């Protein structure tokens, strides 16, 4: 993780509110929208700034809320100096969670269970960083499991440390497709599922749940065929290098030689459904009877219709017309 205060010494990289700014440079350490300069509890979130005894500390961080000289933990009435008063009148409960404010770890959030996963004194219900790994909950791919590296090898949005589905690879160029599980039968995903423009080449992609150096299978060789299954009316676009075989992959995306790379140039705006049929050259040692798989990707194309050039019939007619003109000229010269 990058340093939260690169120009100041902050060895522990402490970032109380998990906003990416180290506490040594953060002008609102607890993230309660109250600047440190005026916050009566700089390290504890307390937007209300409630301060029962009027001292320098807000109730959220004051060890003696009522200022009677008796610590909250042993004070029979921690919110009132008159310790002869007992019962409900002693125990204010602003968030109505049946936890007196004097001992509530989230004064502004109803959390009767007082859950505090990282043990930082701030209840999970109001903690910006529940697991205490200095990654904000809103961007933490394991909000309840410490994982500073945020590793997500299968790209499914759940960090490896907390992924409930184990490893199942998401194809970056077709993320809506079924994920690729290396422990399942041979499977491919076509790509890209993307936007395109008329007249601009679209390079096709193939993913498989068998990496080229599979631990069980060894070197994997895959034959493939790309086809245009659906196209806009009047489109005559064709796929270049639609068939071939490859045994080179980067993780689970297979690579093609530049001279054999499948591609096509859409000529009419609209949807193009690109089909992929793939087959293992050798038997699959994990699932011997499953050697083939199909997939498709949809490319949404915008832009003006592109000319296809002269048709064969048009060229032939032009040649005939030219020949007739030349013949007529020769006849005039003889006359």
Image (cartoon, rainbow, N blue to C red):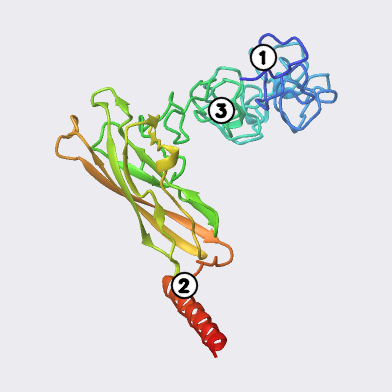
Q: Secondary structure at mark 2?
A: helix
Residue that extends furthest to the front in the rendered view of this protein: 334
Q: Are marks 1 and 3 in contact (CB under 8 Å)?
A: no
- Residue drawn 55% across and 30% down? 140
- Labelled pair 1, 2 in contact (Cβ < 8 Å): no
Q: Is residue 66 left or right of residue 181?
A: right
Q: N-terminal of the two: label 1 or label 3?
A: 1
Say if residue 79 shows up in the picture: no
**Quarter of the view holding residue 134:** top right
Give 94 or 279, whichever is nearer the viewer. 279
Element carrying mark 1: loop
* Mark 3 in CB contact with mark 2 (< 8 angstroms): no
The residue identified by callout 2 is: 315
- Judging by the rendered image, the residue that carries numbered circle 3 is 124
Point out the frontmost of discs 1 and 3: 1
**C-alpha span from label 1 to label 3:** 21 Å
Task: Kindly identify the residue that appears in the image at 19 percent across and 30 percent down.
Answer: 286
Residue 263 vs 168, above or below: the answer is below
Q: CA distance from mark 1 to mark 2?
A: 73 Å
Residue that numbered label 1 is attached to: 13
Indicate which label's residue lies in the foreground, 3 or 2: 2
Residue 215, image quadrant = top left
Image quadrant for the C terminus? bottom right
In terms of depth relative to the viewer, which is nearer, 330 or 173?
330
Label 1 neighbour load within 10 Å: few <14, some 14-19, many 20+? some
Residue 224 as seen in the image, left or right of residue 325: left
Q: Position of residue 278 (x, y in %)?
A: 28, 44
């Amino acid at each position: 993780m990058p340093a939260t205060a690169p120009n100041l010494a902050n060895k522990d990289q402490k970032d109380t509110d998990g906003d990416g700014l180290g506490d040594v440079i953060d002008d609102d350490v607890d993230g309660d929208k109250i600047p440190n300069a005026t916050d009566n509890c700089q390290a504890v979130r307390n937007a209300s700034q409630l301060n029962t005894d009027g001292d320098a500390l807000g109730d959220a961080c004051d060890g003696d809320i009522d200022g009677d000289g008796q610590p909250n933990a042993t004070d029979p009435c921690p919110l009132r100096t008159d310790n002869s008063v007992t019962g409900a009148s002693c125990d204010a409960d602003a968030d109505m969670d049946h936890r007196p404010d004097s001992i509530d770890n989230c004064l502004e959030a109803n959390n009767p269970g007082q859950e505090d996963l990282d043990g930082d004194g701030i209840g999970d219900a109001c903690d910006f960083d529940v697991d205490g790994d200095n990654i904000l909950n809103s961007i933490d791919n394991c909000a309840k499991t410490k994982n500073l590296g945020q590793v997500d090898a299968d790209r499914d949005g759940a960090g490896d440390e907390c992924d409930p589905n184990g490893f199942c690879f998401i194809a970056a160029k077709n993320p809506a497709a079924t994920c690729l599980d290396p422990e399942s039968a041979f499977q491919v995903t076509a790509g890209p599922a993307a936007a395109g423009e008329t007249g601009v080449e679209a390079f096709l992609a193939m993913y498989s749940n068998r990496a080229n150096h599979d631990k069980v299978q060894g070197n994997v060789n895959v034959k493939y065929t790309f086809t245009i299954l659906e196209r806009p009316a009047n489109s005559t676009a064709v796929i270049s290098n639609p068939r071939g075989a490859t045994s080179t992959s980067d993780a689970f995306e297979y690579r093609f030689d530049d001279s054999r790379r499948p591609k096509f140039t859409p000529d009419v705006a609209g949807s193009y459904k690109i089909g992929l049929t793939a087959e293992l050259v050798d038997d699959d040692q994990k699932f011997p009877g499953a050697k083939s798989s199909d997939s498709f990707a949809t490319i949404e194309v915008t832009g003006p219709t592109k000319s296809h050039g002269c048709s064969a019939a048009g060229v032939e007619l032009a040649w005939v017309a030219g020949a007739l003109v030349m013949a007529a000229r020769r006849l005039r010269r003889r006359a």
